[in-house]
Image (tube, coloured by chain):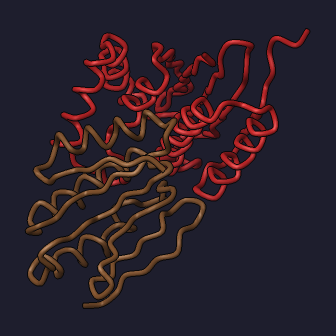
Chain colours: A brown, B red
Amino acid sequence: MNILNLEGTEDTPKIVLDSQNKIYEISGRSLPEDSAEFFQPVLDWLDEYKDASAPETVFEFKLEYFNTASSKLILDILSKLEEVEGAKIMWYFHEDDEDMEEAGEEFSELVDVPFEFKTY
Amino acid sequence: MLTKNLILVYEGEFTQDITKSVLAMAERNMESMGEESGIKRKVFNVMVECLQNICKHAESFDENTYGKNTAIFMIGKHDSEYFITSGNPILSDKVADMSRKLEDINNLDKDGLKQLYKDIIKNGKLSSKGGAGLGFVDMARKSGKKLIFDFEPINEHLSFFSLKTTIPRN
């Protein structure tokens, strides 16, 4: 499968989706002008991956900030991961960032994928 | 003694690039004042929603049809709070709907806002402008205070919408 690798910028997150090396992560800041357009490649990648997924997929979110339009797309990504067997979410938040912790908890209540929370 | 301190005022065109510059300036300013990271994050959060709201809605008006319609954004600091204020023209036929939405948000407590957020994110669709319909709810949640808003008619088509969000510094 193709590797999706996007460098982070001041308003878009770093994204690495690499099934060979088993790296699945979205990190940094997300406030793109058009969140649907920005995240579409991630959704497309997952559509392809779900039919050829590894027995275990640990998908990491290590976000410092995301806007509300991105939150809608994060939910779409999590919903795709519901269809990936053996998927698990690793939700990172800065140790003093209660809002990011709470955001992760809310997502975990909205989808049927196991979440693990970790501070950084 | 300085009790009120305006950090930044911007009036004019709003785009994603301008949003990024305004955010960077306000962030640097809070940094230089040694602001606590939790407060900085909440202020940043409200600024983004506010600025992106203006960007999304500012495009809708053609100056030739509707007259001049520039928007304004301000961030200031008092001893005990930050305040983020924006003002922008909106189509007058949207006033009733927006006013109802904002009043509904102001009538909710912390748990009510959380529930509303979850309902919208789960059942809502992105608008044609890419908005999730979550901006005001998120601003109210980050603020913990009521949103203060007003609508003033500008001309036969437009009204000036002003919104003030406060972030307590404790």
Q: Residue at x 40, y 30 (%)?
A: B136
Residue A106 found in image quarter: top left
Q: Residue at x 57, y 33 (%)?
A: B88
Q: Position of residue B99 (x, y in %)?
A: 37, 19
Outermost residue on the bottom side: it is: A1
Q: Position of residue A4 (x, y in %)?
A: 37, 82
Q: In this view, does A35 lie above or below B92?
A: below
In the rendered image, the quadrant that contains the N terminus of chain A is bottom left
Q: Which residue is drawn at 30% across and 55% down?
A: A74
B30 to the left or right of A71? right
Residue A3 found in image quarter: bottom left
Outermost residue on the right side: it is: B1
Front one among B63 and A76:
A76
Q: Which residue is drawn at 11% across and 67% down?
A: A86
Q: Where is residue B9 in the image (x, y as percent from the top left)?
A: 75, 34
A80 to the left or right of A59? left
Tally of numbered tags = 0
Q: Where is residue B107 in the image (x, y as percent from the top left)?
A: 32, 10
Front one among B166 and B155:
B166
Q: Is residue B89 above or below residue B121?
A: above
B129 to the left or right of A10? left
Residue B128 found in image quarter: bottom left
